[in-house]
Image: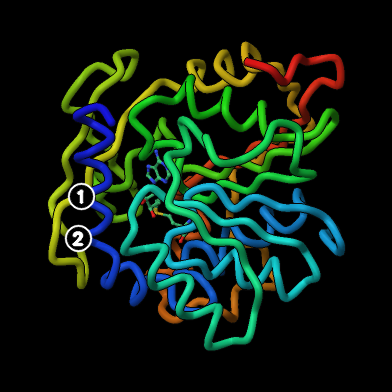
Amino acid sequence: MDRDSEQVRETWNRLAQDWKQQVGEDGDSNRRLNSDPILWKFVGNVQGLRVLDAGCGTGYLARKLAAQGAIVTAVDIAEQMIEIAAQSANEANQTIDFRVEDCAQLSSLEAASFDRIVSNYVLMDVPDLEATVRAFSRVLKPDGIAVLVFSHPCFPQGEAATIDEATLYTWKFPYFERHKCVEPPWGHFTSEFIWFHRPLSDYWKTFKDAGFTIVDLEEPRIVEERFHLAETEGQLQNSKTRPYSIAFKLQKVASQSTSH
Ligand SMILES: C[S@@+](CC[C@H](N)C(=O)[O-])C[C@H]1O[C@@H](n2cnc3c(N)ncnc32)[C@H](O)[C@@H]1O
């Protein structure tokens, strides 16, 4: 494992207990209010389908997929995450195949073996975007669907502030350059985060080069029917105005080779 991947693994092992608290059984407020409805719309009916949750964390999504009848494999680079996720699934009497795996390799997973991949707020955290997306393409069946939700690279929330009616985003490095970012702990977290900025066009080119076409694209935001789920006025306002994430629905082009 290279140095960045090792650092990512250690970071998320340190964050695992705090992450469990962050997302709980249903996801954090951003997921519940904004991105999960889009994720589920893009994933569609999973009954009986083989689904990979890539970068599952403490596994709230893997458990929901299993509850909807999917045959779920869930992987994460951090063994502490997998330990917590496996224990929670066990307590819920759910059968999920949890594995410690680097998404850039997925070496224990067979080529062309999944109908769907979901990867929820993971791509900005992986050191090697290209290898990760190629691995996703390799393990998907021809015509398989990948639903990739990640922090919006144009609007870094860690440096965002609302002053009067305006939302301000701060860039401490050039947007067009890839950049490894270290973010201090926020909220209840006790350890720093590491993530990797890439401009939006790099994501699209990487998806295309790995043999994907874009079926749908959304910048998730709260819809009126969900306003009542916001716990505070500030949360509602942020959900209405801040593009926290971007969500891609990709399809693996059927003729794509699965041997790379
Ligand atoms: C922001 S958390 C999201 C977790 C989960 N998907 C969720 O929505 O709660 C990012 C997760 O990606 C995992 N991760 C980061 N890089 C990874 C890699 N190269 N391979 C597998 N998992 C990775 C981290 O360990 C962490 O659990």
Q: Which colour scheme is used?
A: rainbow
Q: Is residue 250 left or right of residue 56?
A: right
| Among the 4 quarters of the image, the one containing residue 144 | top right
Amino acid found under the numbered disc labelled 2: Arg
In this view, 100 is above or below 89? above
Q: Is mark 2 on a helix, strand or loop?
A: helix
The 10 Å Cα crowd at callout 2, few under 14, some 14 to 19, many 20 or more, is some
**Residue 157, percent from left and from top:** 32, 47
**Residue 140, percent from left and from top:** 73, 34
In this view, 93 is above or below 105? below
Amino acid found under the numbered disc labelled 1: Glu
Q: Residue at point 70% right, 31% down?
A: 111
Q: What element carries label 1?
A: helix
The disc at residue 57 is: none
The quadrant in which the N terminus is found is top left
Q: Is residue 164 left or right of residue 205?
A: left
Total count of labels: 2
Q: In this view, does 12 lie to the left or right of 224?
A: left
- Foreground residue, 192 or 170? 192
The 10 Å Cα crowd at callout 1, few under 14, some 14 to 19, many 20 or more, is some
Circle 2 sits on which residue? 14
**Residue 93, percent from left and from top:** 63, 86
The quadrant in which the C terminus is found is top right
Q: Do the residues labelled 1 and 2 touch (CB within 8 Å)?
A: yes
Circle 1 sits on which residue? 10
